[in-house]
Amino acid sequence: MEDLKIGVYVCNCGTNIAHVIDAESVKNYAATLPGVKIARSYRYMCSNPGQEMIVEDIRSQGLNRVVVAACSPRMHERTFRNACRTAGLNPYLCEMANIREQCSWVHNDSVAATEKAMALTRAAVLRVACQEPLEGLTAEMCPTTLVLGGGIAGLTAALELADGGFPVVIVERADRLGGNLTRVDLTAPHFDSARDLVRERIAHVRGNPNVTVMLRSELRSLSGFVGNFTAEIATNGGKPTKVRVGNVVVATGYKEFDASRVTHFGYGKLPNVITSFDFERMLRAGRIETKDGRLPQYAAIIHCVGSRSEEFHAYCSRVCCMTALKYANEIKSAIPTCYVSDLYIDMHAFGKGCEDFYKRSSEAKTLFLMYGKGDHPVIRRAASTDDCDMLIEVEEKLSGEHIEIPADLVILMVGMEARADAADVAHVVNISQDKSGWFIESHPKLDPVATTTDGVYIAGTCAAPKDIPDTVAQARAAAARILAKIAKGKIEIDGVFAEVNEEQCSGCRMCNELCPYSAIEFDADKKRSHVIPAACKACGACVAACPSAAIKGRHFTDAQIFAQIEGVLL
Amino acid sequence: MSYEPKLVGFLCNWCSYTGADLAGTSRIQYPPNIRIIRVMCSARIDPSFILQSLGKGADGVLICGCHPGDCHYSEGNYKAMRRYPLLKRLLDAYGIEHERVRLEWVSASEGQRFADVVADMTERLRALGPCRVKTALATDQIER
Amino acid sequence: MAAKKLQIALYWGAACGGCDVAVLDTNEFILTVGEAADIRLWPIAADGKYQDIEAMADGELDLSLFNGAVRNSENEHIAKLLRRKSKLLVAFGSCAHLGGIPGLANLTSKEDIFATAYLGNASIEPGNRTVPHPKTQVNGHSLEIPAFYRRVYRLSDVVDVDYFVPGCPPEPSQIKNVLLAVVKGELPPKKSVVGASERTLCDDCARRKTEKKVKRFYRPWEIIQDPERCLLEQGIVCMGPATRSGCGVRCPNSNQGCRGCYGPAPGVVDHGAKFLSAISSIIDSKDPKEIDAILGTLPDFIGIAYRFGLPASILQRRHGA
């Protein structure tokens, strides 16, 4: 092995590090460590001149390892790895010591913090000496995409991909396409027909030879890895068929909140208390009426049923406020004499054109009543002497008064919730759910349609409540991500994964069941296990569990971690 | 000189290490006794890392992973959870107070909790006194 | 001219004698050895004095097989002596290699051992309860016996060892292979483990291996076992997956779990910790209480995990008061 020539770079981060840590001492100390050829400190290592310093030293001094004592590797590891790559040094020969987030920012004792920074730098130097150059791998990308769910999200994603010329398989549990949107009449705030939106999508899907639609079908299992999944799809509960796919879009949608869980609104007991979906059915039938066929003189709309509640769902369902305004408008135009009251907690009108819509609706003589989040309106049957069917009592927040309003028809704006079988879907495609059951994205801001499983994307309301424009945008975003991958043709696999040394594996099969990604395969003929690099996420569970140390966790090897232990404790 | 406990922390990348970083970005102060080693998942933490830390002079070892049900790798933290009780038994048999090794779940949003855990553990180690394994093993080679 | 005969010494430190018997178990092969070699020291089988060894030139011995752990000053003295006089010093058998069964004494103290062995034991006559001291005066003469150490060491803790032959005891067929390799000069790089496989027992074990998920552990007599199936999968503790092979899978073939005498697989730092990591990974529960209960069915874990190698473990011995 060639001699170690380690360069150590101690960042001051302006004063972020240097105000507590004596960076000069850390630098001088680092220079004395074994294998260190050069040690420098600099104001901002991540700046262009800082990176150029590293590049220049690698080139002129022949450095073969680099340690940067600076911020968290979660912040700038990629930056410094790239600098190494630029200089022709394998990026995995770079190691960071976190002396900002985990040192200068959390300790104000300069002496202790400097000592700790030295220990962390020493650990990084000892570790980097054990690090090895790593190369990633490439694998084929199957151009077929599996879309789970034939609602607006799934249809849109499928069309985007199919229009790009690539095969798509839509798997839909129901016996028709369209999803929840087929139950909606008009959309807010522009009063477009929801059915027209969906019909147009379905027609295109049906007309596109790249799309295969599988109704009354469900995904039973998904094995393999990005670019190379095998999906087992069962139709009508029959024997599953295997389909090879490269990517998966999960667009399984939502279900509406069950209003009968809220007892104080009398849903299911009072005949004229209905949910927003009941009302949509009425609208599509073309007649707004009470149970006994009368035109309501008083209509009331109650927001946040099941949403923004401690008891049910803490989150906002996002679409109900504008839908409620749509109802107010529709009732007013169908029955101009009808008094419409709208009972809300807060009016969320965040979408494009929504604030305008709210303003217009406010002018249309709807009575807006605000109630408190912890509070709720109570509905009771009116007396026979009253000219209405029901009375709603509410503590009106803006006036501070206890108000009683008449109602012949009450519409409960039920929120969205994760489907009951979302956990099964999550399990099959190996993605996670948050505490409310929504699928979790890879990064909530920067990577909203990817998941922690490569090649599995989420779109629409299976990830969280959202309206049609956001759903469509996500579906197209997921499709765009996949198209970009298909366009590349091959997938690149990171160099960090577990690998089985077949000279040492004894086929005990201890690791086989441990991998959450089924990345470990057992070859029964050879009596050896091996890891599929593309499926491995490098968690290291099998590495720690392998009783014969036959599995090496690349970039997190036992030797590297032992070196770090030595380093932090010396 | 008074005794300052040496604490080695093994933190999973996705939750706990990020939580420790958050303590930093939030400028939450905690004792400088801990030295953190990053692993991708708490399931990677081989019990020999913990024994090695104690053998090399650590007074305590903190293992942190995502909360159960919250693992980035779906169930890695359960693997850590299964090793821990057996490790504690082993430490007892070695005559080493098992309180020196602690498993805690710290999420990426729990910067404050991470700081609290480190402060608490540092205090407990201070009360427990130094772990004498390293010196004992060195003495063994001189005095038979 | 006849080739110069190989000069050999065999010695036992803190040992049971099983390793020496294993050498004899090579049957007629040992007779060939006797013809091809001069056995200069073998306390269990032949007469020989330490002075004879001391009188030798350094490096005069071609090979010394040292079995047994280092428990007292005599063991250490001879280890150092043989090291000086031998071209090749081999730690022979589990005790010399890893500390072996005597190494379990590292879980207790010299004082406790003496209190049990010389004072507490019911079989000791009341008037005879004396504890040995390294130096005593008898009739005006000074008597010395070896000093009993505070703990047990491996051979490599006190001298530089060239090769390690694992096993409690080493398999006779493996002993033959090692001796032949010495004669032919076909030894691997120094510090290697010889007379054993580079893989673990599972490689040689014929039992069927499938999914490993354990709900409780059984001692061998607590369960009717499936003789075709992996013992660990049936909840019977077997160190096989973590233990270097070479023994011929003797214990699992006799329906007993492997006890780990051949030591850890190549590259493993701590045999017991590795086994701990593996065995707890296959516990089939996510509930801390249930996990604890399952582990409760696993008695004396340190005794299982370090039966043959406590002095070779990272922590080496019991610590604390």
Image (cartoon, rainbow, N blue to C red):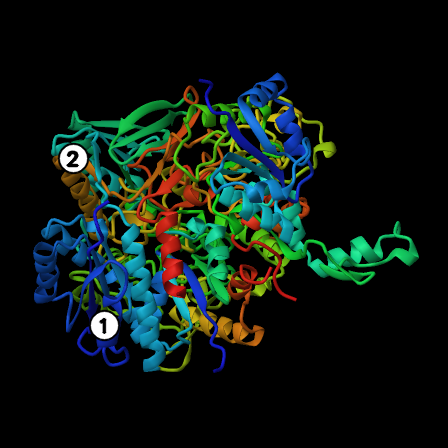
Marks 1 and 2: CB-CB under 8 Å?
Answer: no
Q: Nearer the viewer, residue A137 or A396?
A: A137
Q: Which chain carries label 2?
A: A
Tag 2 secondary structure: helix
Can see residue A474?
A: yes
The structure residue drawn at horizontal position 67% and vertical position 36%, both measured from the top left corner, is C43
**Residue A493 x %, y %:** 23, 40
The image shows residue C158 at horizontal and vertical percentages of: 53, 51
When asked about the image quadrant of residue B22, the answer is bottom left
Whole-percent x, y for residue A485 in the image: 17, 38
Q: What element carries label 1?
A: helix
Mark 1 and mark 2: Cα distance apart in space: 50 Å
For residue A486, the mark is: 2
Q: Label for residue A310?
A: none
Q: Position of residue A455 (x, y in %)?
A: 26, 39
Q: Which amino acid does label 1 sit on?
A: Asn
Is residue A398 in view from this perspective? no
Count of marks overlaid on the render: 2
Q: Compared with residue C173, is residue A10 higher up or lower down, i.e. above or below?
A: below
Host chain of mark 1:
A
Q: Nearer the viewer, residue B40 or B138?
A: B138
Q: In this view, does C180 lie above or below A226?
A: above
Q: Which of C224 and C27 lies nearest the eye of the viewer?
A: C27
- First along the sequence among labels 1 and 2: 1
Left or right: residue A159 compared with residue C84: left
In the figure, residue A429 lies in which quadrant? top left
How dense is the environment of label 1, judged by Cα within 10 Å: few (below 14), some, or many (20 and up)?
Answer: some
Q: Mark 1 points at which residue?
A: A28
Q: Say which quadrant the N terminus of chain A sits in.
A: top left
Asked if C35 appears above or below A58 in the picture, the reply is above
Alpha-carbon neighbours of circle 2 within 10 Å: few (<14), some, or many (≥20)? many
- Which residue is more in the foreground, A291 or A414? A414
